[in-house]
Image: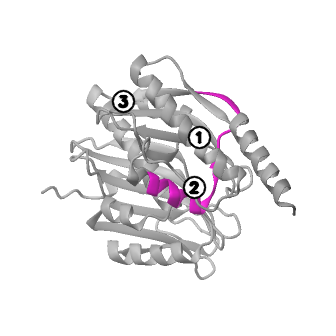
Amino acid sequence: MNKKVTLLILALALALSAQAKGVIKIADGEVPAAIKTVLEANANKLLSDMEHACIMHLSKISIANNYMTKSAEEDLKQMWKSSAMRCPDGIISCRGMSTPNGGWQLRGIPVDLDEADEGEERQELTIGFLPDGRIDQVAIAIEMHRYDELMAEQESDLDYTRRQIIVNFIENFRTAYNRRDIGYLEQVYSDNALIITGKVVQEKQGYKDVSGSTLGGQRVAYVQQSKREYLTRLKAVFNRARYLNVKFEDIEIVQHPKYDGWYGVTLKQHWHTSGYSDEGYLFLMVDFRDENLPLITVRTWQPHKDKYGNVVTTREDVFSLGDFKIERK
């Protein structure tokens, strides 16, 4: 191709990227006008860099770290390895709010993931900021309506603040799987974490479970792993998978009725890689006594259906806080 024609096409692509893109506007709320301007400017720089990388089909996204911390930049680059993403064109009205650490957060930002499952391309992004307005977090968010529902279930002002922290934790936790961040998962699992994984197994005809109900010859067997065993196997999965997408839904947060700072988080997890998919219920018992370093002390996963589509675990069958004894130190 003629060099001049190539340069003309490149210039046209750049011009289109500058015109056709989403523009973030923070809806009226709790963000003061002065910092609101900074948040909008930095969020739109991020959207512009994402748009440019998508239009130019770049395998790596380039970020100017004057508006983003180095750690957030590295996290975004890891996310980009799983899937490029861009915001839809037009004005994007999102919610701005303060965070317990004195920073800021924008929620409800629509984003389309190139490598998402069919029908799951449109998801939501949350952007976290330091008090000075620099971006220090980018994560795939839970739906805005579910966020509002979880916050509305608060039992006190303290519980509301903790729920903010917990939702932020859940979103980071989910995004850590999508960006294959073993280092982050090392930090959030307690060294003595109890990790239990369920697997559907075939039994003799007429097998009955402990409740006496017949499962059509199938039951769920459970395997216990240490933190090290679990993360070693997970790292191998990360290395094998060309593409990985983890989605959470039906999230429920329950405060322990007896022990302050302990919470149970139950959700349905959809796991999809280039070679394997499953759907099941995830339960996490999390110690939030140190709000700067929440620790997962129990993780259980139970399959929802077998390979034939038969339900083997219902929501009522999922592990909960009452199934585990807390030994406080």
Mark toward the start of the polypeptide (1 vs 3) = 1
In what element is the residue under mark 2?
A: loop
Q: Amino acid at mark 3?
A: Gln
Residue 240: where, in percent of width, then height? 57, 77
Residue 81: where, in percent of width, then height? 58, 63
Left or right: where 225 falls relative to 138: left
Callout 1: 10 Å neighbours few (<14), some, many (20+)? many
* Residue for point 42% across, 56% down: 283
* Residue for point 59% across, 62% down: 82
Task: Provide the residue designation for mark 3.
Answer: 154
Residue 4: where, in percent of width, then height? 83, 55
The residue lying toward the viewer, choosing from 223 and 183, is 183
Q: CA distance from mark 1 to mark 3?
A: 33 Å
Callout 2: 10 Å neighbours few (<14), some, many (20+)? many
Where are the magenta residues, as a range?
73-93
Is 243 contained in the magenta span?
no
Callout 3: 10 Å neighbours few (<14), some, many (20+)? some
Q: CA distance from mark 2 to mark 3?
A: 39 Å
Q: CA distance from mark 2 to mark 1?
A: 11 Å
Would you place residue 274 above or below residue 63 in this image? below
Residue 221: where, in percent of width, then height? 48, 74
Task: Provide the residue designation for mark 1.
Answer: 47
Task: Name the image quarter holding residue 298.
Answer: bottom left
Residue 269 appears anywhere in the view: yes
Image quadrant where one finds the N terminus = bottom right
Q: Amino acid at mark 2?
A: Ile
Q: Amino acid at mark 1?
A: Leu
In what element is the residue under mark 1?
A: helix
Task: Name the image quarter holding residue 46.
Answer: top right
Image quadrant where one finds the C terminus = bottom left
Task: Provide the residue designation for mark 2.
Answer: 61
